[in-house]
Structures are given as structure tokens and as C-alpha cells.
Image: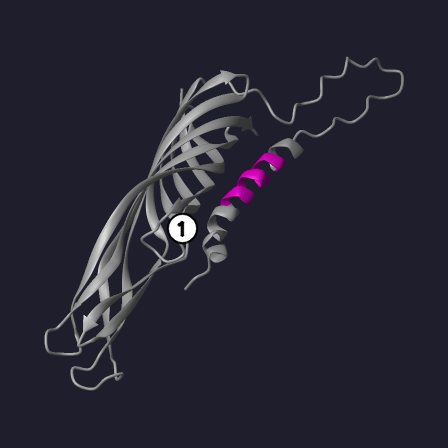
Amino acid sequence: MISSRTRLAPLAGAALFLLFASTTDLSAQTTPDPPPAGQQTAPAAPAPRLFSAWTDRLFVNVSLGQQWMNQQLRTSGSIADVYEETATWESSSEVDDSQLFDIAGGVRLWKNLAFGAGFTRTSDTHTADFDALIPDTLEFDSPHADTRTIEGLEREETIIHLSAIWMVPITGRIDIALSGGPSFFNVTQDYVAGMTVTPGESTIADVTTSSFKRSVTGFHIAADGTVRVIRNAGVGFLIRYATAKLDTPELLGGTIDVGGFQGLAGVRIRF
């Protein structure tokens, strides 16, 4: 599996490109040679500001990307009175990286300060390994092991972000938006809930699954760099960390982390 750090490399490169471009633009403003002795000089022009004021009123961002996470979900249980003994089972599934869609908008409130709201949806389909120990039909204390692979388990997260945004124009074409605030998660998760035993045999007849749907509040921080292609539109690269901890009594451990590191790219529109 490719590590999260490796997958973050293209986004880190995009951020470095934005910073390099702004540095190049500022360094191109060279200091003029001093005038000859005795010649009257004009008043010096004011030094250029490193960051200019943000003048847009509204913005809309539409992005596609990926959420990076690696999380194991585990359940277990037992069935009493199986051939006068107890059958036991456990399952383990791994929730991995998932694709996401994101749309956001905002309005400038004062100088470079803006308020924004966004919607993110991410989904993933994963499998679970299921292991059972089932008593023998005749011999006491001689359980039989049986296994299954359960496919098609789904995880979906929808998130509403509310953000305070500080917009930093680097040049006339490049700006960076730094943001943070609360995130409201709605999570739907499938999980393995139990099994049935084949009558008269020491094998699994069927594995049952269930799901829960739950909400929780967390937070996010983000940096979004934009390069304008035309006056009111351009492309952007967003890195965001959004997270919350969800109570899950159905799963071993009792809680899971939702959200994760997110990398996105898309269209940026300004008004």
C-alpha cells in the first residue's frame, strides 16, 4: 500500500509551486541604480507590500479529491446452545482511502476576512474477514474453524463545514486561503453483526450484516491555493484535515475516527 505521505507529494508540490511563483514575482522588482553625484533624485516610491488587499466579494469552489485514512473495524459475538456448547465468531474489516466531492462558497466580511460554508461527500466499499469456531456435532470440546470473506460493506460520510477564512493575495494571479472551523459529520457504516450455523453441521450457514447512521461534530483546518487563469476563474489545490470521534457501541473499542486528511483540486470562481 502506498503511504499517505507519498500520496500527499503532488499536493505539497503544488503548494511549493505557489510559494515559488510569488517569490519570483517579488524578486523581479529590482532596486534601481543610484543617480550620479549632484543630480537631484525624485522621492522614493513606497516599498511594495508583501501581501495586497483582497478585493473579491464572493467565491465558489468545486473540487474532486481523495480522503486518506486507514482504520480497522472489528466485531465479535457468540451463539449459545450449539450442540450443547457455544459457537464464537469475530470479524475484521479495513476502511481505506476514499474518493470525495466538495463544493464550497463564501463571502468577504471585512478586509481579507471571509465566512464560508462547504459540503463534502466521501464513500468507500470494503470487505471483512469473518472467522468462526463452531462446536462439533458429536465430540465435545472439539470446535471446527470456518471462515468467510464478506464483500460490499459501505462507508459514507457527508460533512458540512463552516469556516472563518483569511485570504492572502500573493500576486495578482495567486492567492492562498487559510481556514478553519467546525465540521458536522453524518456517517453511515455497514458492519458484520452475526452468523447462523448450518443445522446438523459445524459450518457457517450465513453471515448477517447491519448498519448504523450517526452524527457528530468535529473540526477542520485547511489551506487552499488558487492560480487564476482568467480574471474571475482559475484552478485551485486544497489540503484539509477534518476529524471527529464517533461513538460506536456496535464495534469493538466503542469509538471510531471519521474524516481524515483530504487533498482536492478543482475550479475556483470569484466575483
Q: Residue at x 50, y 29 (%)?
A: 173
Looking at the image, residue 216 lies above or below residue 133: above
Q: Which residue is mark 1?
A: 255
Q: Which quadrant of the view contains residue 259? A: top left
- Estimate the x, y position of residue 94 in percent, counting from the top left: 35, 60
**Is 51 positioned to the left or the right of 39 in the image?**
left
* Local crowd size for mark 1, using a 10 Å CA cut-off: few (<14), some (14–19), many (≥20): some
Please give the range of residues in magenta.
Answer: 14-23
Query: What secondary structure prevails in the magenta region?
Result: helix
**Is 236 positioned to the left or the right of 123 in the image?**
right
Q: Residue at x 67, y 29 (%)?
A: 29
104 vs 126, nearest the viewer: 126
Instruction: Answer whether residue 60 is visible to the viewer in this image.
Output: no
Residue 21 within the magenta-colored segment of the rendering: yes
- Estimate the x, y position of residue 146 in percent, counting from the top left: 23, 76
The amino acid type, in three-letter code, at marker 1 is Thr
- Estimate the x, y position of residue 12 in percent, counting from the top left: 52, 47
**Is 154 positioned to the left or the right of 243 in the image?**
left
27 vs 88, nearest the viewer: 88
Looking at the image, residue 18 lies above or below residue 56: below
Q: Residue furthest left?
A: 199
Looking at the image, residue 238 lies above or below residue 193: above
- Estimate the x, y position of residue 268 in percent, counting from the top left: 40, 31
